[in-house]
Image: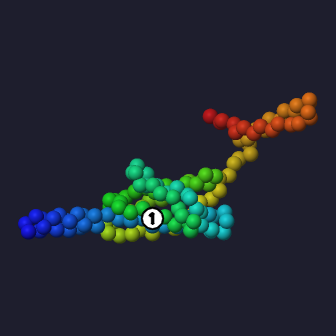
Amino acid sequence: MKNLVLFLVLLVSIGLSAQDKGTIQGKIMDLEANNDPLLMAEVQIRDTEFKTRTNFNGNFEIDGIEPGSYTMTVSFLGYESIELPVEVAANETVRIESGLKAQTLDLSDITALISEDTEDSSAVVSIEKENKK
């Protein structure tokens, strides 16, 4: 009987300590496509192991976060990454709604090299981005 009471107290204390953490939920939209959901965007909390991806509706959820101030980064290939400050409180859910814009290239940074093969009269185009230092 004594072991059963000790086990129940231990179980309840574990459950109570797990409730001291917060959650971040949100939705990431594609600002280039009329705020459509951006699926499979990477969402992570900088300097932690917390990382996830958005689902087909652009939604994500990260739970079990210690209370405190964090920086959340959102990135997707071909889009400009963003950083958002997030304040996580114990036993609360923070809701984030944001969007990503497509990256733009400055055409002055791109050089096109065209070489022609006279044997079969085909052309090869190579595009390189210049490294400005």
Number of numbered discs on residues: 1
Instruction: Kindly identify the residue that appears in the image at 92 percent across and 29 percent down.
Output: 119
Query: Which residue appears at 74% of the width and 45% of the height?
Result: 107
Which percent across, then down, holds residue 92? 35, 70
Q: Residue at x 63, y 68 (%)?
A: 36
In the picture as drawn, the residue positioned furthest to the left comes out as: 2
- Of all residues, the one furthest to the front in this rendering is 1
Q: Determine the image quadrant of residue 6.
A: bottom left
Image quadrant where one finds the N terminus: bottom left
Three-letter amino acid code at the position of disc 1? Glu
- Determine the residue located farthest toward the top in the rendered image: 119
Residue 88 seen anywhere in this rendered image of the structure: no
The colouring scheme, among rainbow, by chain, secondary structure or one colour, is rainbow
| Element at label 1 | strand
On the image, the x and y values in percent for residue 5 come to 11, 68
> Pointer 1: what residue?
61
User: Can you say whether 116 is above or below 59 in the image?
Assistant: above
Q: Can you say whether 119 is above or below 111 in the image?
A: above
Rendered location of residue 105, percent (x, y): 69, 48
Residue name at image x 31 percent, y 66 percent: 90
Relative image position of residue 13 (x, y in whole percent): 19, 65
Position of 79 compared to 66: left or right?
right
Quarter of the image with the C terminus is top right
Location of residue 131 (image quadrant) = top right
* Left or right, 60 with reference to 70: right
Q: Circle 1: is it few (<14), some (14-19), or many (20+) Cα within 10 Å?
A: some
Please indicate, yes or no, whether residue 12 appears anywhere in the rendered image: yes
